[in-house]
Image (spheres, helix red, strand yellow):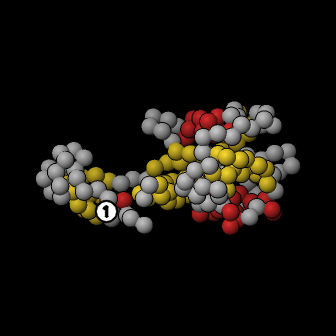
Amino acid sequence: MTHPMETFLYCPRCGAAGFAPHDERSCRCRQCGFLFYANCATAVAAVITDKDGRILLCTRACEPQKGMLDLPGGFVEFDETAEAALRRELAEELGIKVHDVRYLFSQPNRYTYSGYTVHTLDMFFRVEAGEIGHIRCSDDVSRAEFIAPGEIDFSRIGFWSMKAALHKVIDENLL
C-alpha cells in the first residue's frame, strides 16, 4: 500500500518537480515553498433496520471490495453536509428517501482505489427511511438485503471500518 505522500511528484501550484514529503502528512515544494496537507476524506454510511430488527446490507457492484457486503453510503461532496450526502447516496444507490438521520459515531478507514489509498473518516448514521419495500439497486450496489444481526457473516464485510461499526451497533444495541 502506497502512502499518499509518496504519490505526488510535482507541485500542484507551480508544476515543479521536487514536491517531496515534508512530514508524515504533508509535502512541500522545493521550488515555490507550497505546503500541501493530505487530510482525510469524509464518507457516510447508513444503519437501516426493518420492523424485525434486521440490518440492510448491500453487495458492492464495483471495486474496491466488489461482491462484498457493505452498509449503504458513500463520499461527501464539496459544499455538502454529511446528512445531505447520506440522503443523496441512499437515493442514488437504493432509490429510497430518508426522513430521520441521527449521527451515531465515526470510524477511520482506508479506501484503496486505482492503486491510491484514500484515508477516510467514515461517519455512521441511524436512518429512518420511508417505504423501503421497493428498493431499486443501482450505482455502487448490485443487491440489498436485510440480515438479522446474529446472521451477519463478518468475513463477507468488505471494509474493516464497516465491520467495526456493525460490531459496535450490535454490541451497544444502537439499532
Q: Residue furthest left?
A: 31
Q: Secondary structure at mark 1?
A: helix
Indicate the position of residue 10 as horizontal and vertical percent values.
22, 53
Determine the image quadrant of residue 139.
top right
Q: Viewer-proximal residue, 130 or 9? A: 9
Residue ID at (48%, 39%) = 77
**Residue at point 76%, 57% (across, down):** 173
Nearer-the-camera pick, 6 or 80: 6
Relative side of 41 to 51, left or right: left
View extreme (right): residue: 52
Identity of the residue drawn at 22% across and 50% down: 11
Left-right relation of 65 to 115: right
| Residue at x-position 48% and y-position 58% | 112
Residue type at the position of mark 1: Glu
* Residue annotated with mark 1: 6
- Quarter of the figure with residue 30: bottom left
Tell me where residue 138 appears, x and y as whole percent.
64, 39
Q: Left of 143 or right of it: where is 121?
A: left
Horizontal side of residue 33 vs 21, given as left or right: left
Residue 94 place in picture, x, y as percent: 68, 39
